[in-house]
Image (cartoon, helix red, strand yellow):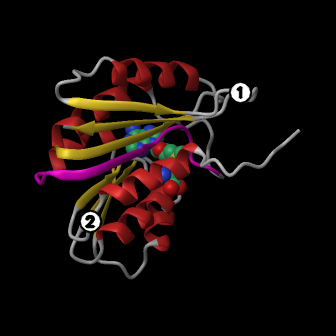
Amino acid sequence: MVNSTSLPRPTEMAHRLLREKLQPGDQAIDATVGNGYDTLFLAEQVGPKGHVYGFDVQEIAIEKTRQRVAGRENITLRCLSHDLLDRYISESISAITFNLGYLPGGDKSITTQPQTTMAALRNSVKVLKEGGLLTIVAYIGHEGGLRESNTVADWASSLDQNVFNTVRYEFTNQCNTPPFLIAVEKR
Ligand SMILES: C[S@@+](CC[C@H](N)C(=O)[O-])C[C@H]1O[C@@H](n2cnc3c(N)ncnc32)[C@H](O)[C@@H]1O
């Protein structure tokens, strides 16, 4: 079986799109900071004059992220569910990223949940500025993942095309329930 590819994985494709969108000085949100890789990536894109707001429900994820981004002053981390993000964000946001599921290397029973994920996504598109980008990497393999992924995909494809452009990116011939990327651009 071939197990390597030059095609970007959904997480890599999300970074490509985010890199193209974000400019120095922009504001961005990492809605699921986890181990901090995406937070660091966003902070690099927006630079010292920009800002990244990060959310996670687990203190251990916040702490891991704090360590990964140590020394950077353009990041605010909150141990808080992402459905509350609009209470803390007053700026218009250029990009928001969600990487759903559980914390890699952490407690697999703590995962994103359809109800809070959907509330967070609805709030995300409100704080996104015109031309802004929302990316969601959804995982099917873990318990509850299929239901959450389908809910997110259905929501994205029901968004008004006069206001949003939505795409889906995924490997279509893999047997092992690969993740997929949804990207939503606010027109
Ligand atoms: C796949 S991990 C994120 C990986 C991360 N972006 C990175 O770069 O390492 C998913 C994270 O979502 C977090 N999470 C679960 N429910 C959440 C919620 N309601 N609000 C914010 N984060 C949540 C989990 O605690 C976990 O750390």
In percent of width and height, residue 57 lies at: 41, 46
* Relative horizontal placement of residue 44, taking residue 10 as reference (left or right): left
Disc 2 + disc 1, Cβ < 8 Å:
no
Question: Going 22% across and 36% down the picture, which residue do you hit?
Answer: 125
Report crowding for label 1: few under 14, some 14 to 19, many 20 or more residues within 10 A (C-alpha): few
In percent of width and height, residue 173 lies at: 71, 27
**Which of the labelled discs sits on residue 23, or is there none?**
2
Farthest residue in the front direction? 6
One can see residue 10 in this view: yes
172 vs 111, nearest the viewer: 172
Report crowding for label 2: few under 14, some 14 to 19, many 20 or more residues within 10 A (C-alpha): some
Asked which quadrant contains residue 87, the reply is: top left
33 vs 14, nearest the viewer: 14
Magenta-drawn stretch contains 91: yes
**Which of the labelled discs sits on residue 117, or is there none?**
none
In percent of width and height, residue 12 lies at: 54, 52
Q: Which residues are magenta?
A: 90-104
Question: Going 64% across and 47% down the picture, which residue do you hit?
Answer: 7
In percent of width and height, residue 143 lies at: 62, 25
174 vs 82, nearest the viewer: 174
Question: Going 24% across and 66% down the picture, which residue do you hit?
Answer: 51
Quadrant of the snapshot with the C terminus: top left
Q: Which residue is mark 1?
A: 173
What number of labels is visible? 2
Asked which quadrant contains residue 3, the reply is: top right
* Relative horizontal placement of residue 166, taking residue 51 as reference (left or right): right
